[in-house]
Amino acid sequence: MAKTTKTTSSKPKSAARSKKTSQTKVYDSGSPLLRFLIKKPVIILFILLFAGLGTWLIAGGHALNLNDAEETKDNPARGLIYNGKKEASSGHCKGAFETDTTDASGQVLCGHPDPGPEGVDVRERNKGVDAQLNAQAAKDAKTPALAAEADTVSVDGAADVGSANSLNAVTPVNWPCAGTGTDGYRLQMIYAYAGGAANRVAYVRPGFETIARRLNAVYHNSGVVSGAVRNVRFVTDGACTLSLPAVAITGDINDANNIRNQLRARGFNASSRKYLVEVDGGSACGWGDLAIDSKPTQDNANNSGNLFAFVWHPCWNYAEPHETMHTMGAVQIGAPYGTSKYHCYDQHDVMCYNDGSGKAMILRCTNSIQIWRFDCGSDTYFRAVGASGWLSTHWNTANSRFLSH
Ligand SMILES: [Zn+2]
């Protein structure tokens, strides 16, 4: 470090010496004070400039800038599209991204983009998503899903988990037909498409129903594992048909803020609704809104609505459990096995992945089906019955009123 600094600063010294020789003739007749004022500042300026530049380069200023750029550089293969946003290094959303809105407690609402499956190029996945969903829907039609089923895993499901490609591995439990379909606190699915593109809602509906089934199964089975059934309270009609409004979006289809703002303006802004937005288009993977609030009581900001989970086309039928669980309030900072970026590191677990926080991943739940279960160990963010330790004194998403108990 010191060596390079010296080398860098020695060049201007040499240059200054030769300059001094030539300038001596010009200012030879001037007073010593004049020569000092004219010549010395120039020399000192050169030395300081080059020495400072060298020191800055060596001290890592340049490297830090590169690192910052890398952090927010899009990674299309993983579906990470930042729209110029930067992760907050301080403040309320530290470790996450600030949105342009507030949560139920009046604090700035936080959130973050999530990548696609590890080892999968989501641009390739994007090409096969519709066919995968159609096949899954056809399979569901042939073998009607049960209303609620014990926590069993099929062999072919386990194989699908190995590919980390879909939610096939979960037991196909239907969504619950609770109440009128609209009463109380619920999850509203929305089909969002780019204005000017085709509205394919009729085509994709069977696929979204299969996603809803499997999304619910993740909650359902995670509840069973930790002591009691939990189901997602989807918005349906009176006959339990999944509500799936289609909304055209203008502007940047990859931008969560842009889509959220337009949906809210269209009336999707209820405190009794969380929103799962399936975006038909874009090149991003997932985004989850998350209120930074770990208090255990029902007035936790994550127990309110108007929070959005986004899943773009390349990650349909993959990111829904992760993003909706963020909107339920996981994973809060300080939780056991939690990272500094609102995930966990004790795999397998829907909410655990190497998120760049520097936490080393550990394999704590070895059964691969746990890839589609919440909270390995039931001690970080979700436990239906018998929460103890940190989870008994902080927010437990299994207590969410958006789930049936
Ligand atoms: Zn996440």
Image (tube, rainbow, N blue to C red):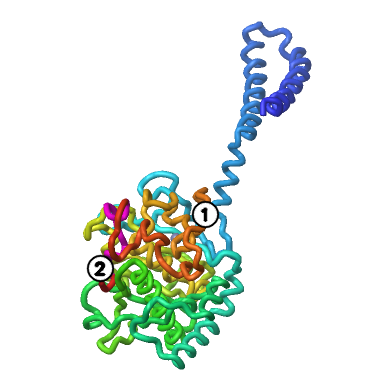
- Looking at the rendering, the stretch of residues picked out in magenta corresponds to 390-402
Q: Is residue 111 above or below residue 227?
A: above
Of badges 2 and 1, nearer the viewer stands 1
Q: Which image quarter: residue 163?
A: bottom right
Above/below status of 29 relative to 325? above
Label for residue 401?
A: 2
Which residue lies under the disc numbered 1? 361
Near-viewer residue (204 or 256): 204
Q: Residue at x 73, y 9 (%)?
A: 28
Pointer 1 residue Cβ closer than 8 Å to ligand 1: no
Question: CA separation, marks 2 and 1?
Answer: 31 Å
Q: Quadrant of ligand 1?
A: bottom left
Residue type (three-letter) at the residue carrying disc 1: Met
Residue visible at 42% across and 52% down in the picture: 338
Q: Quadrant of residue 159?
A: bottom right
Labels in figure, total: 2
In the image, what residue occupies the spot 37% across and 78% down?
A: 150
Residue 246: x %, y % from top left: 38, 81
x, y (%) of residue 15? Answer: 75, 23
**Disc 1 secondary structure class:** loop
Along the viewing direction, whichever of 82 and 266 lies nearer the viewer: 82
Which class describes the residues within 10 Å of circle 1: few (<14), some (14-19), or many (20+)?
A: some
Rendered-image quadrant of the N terminus: top right
The residue nearer to you, when weighing 266 against 236, is 236
Camera-side residue of 39 and 149: 149
Judged left or right of residue 139, residue 392 is left
- The answer to whether one can see residue 263 in this image is no
Q: In the displayed structure, does residue 130 sit left or right of residue 341?
A: right
Which element is circle 2 on? loop
Does residue 221 lie above or below 375 as drawn?
A: below
Q: Is residue 221 above or below residue 90?
A: below
Q: Amino acid at mark 2?
A: Arg
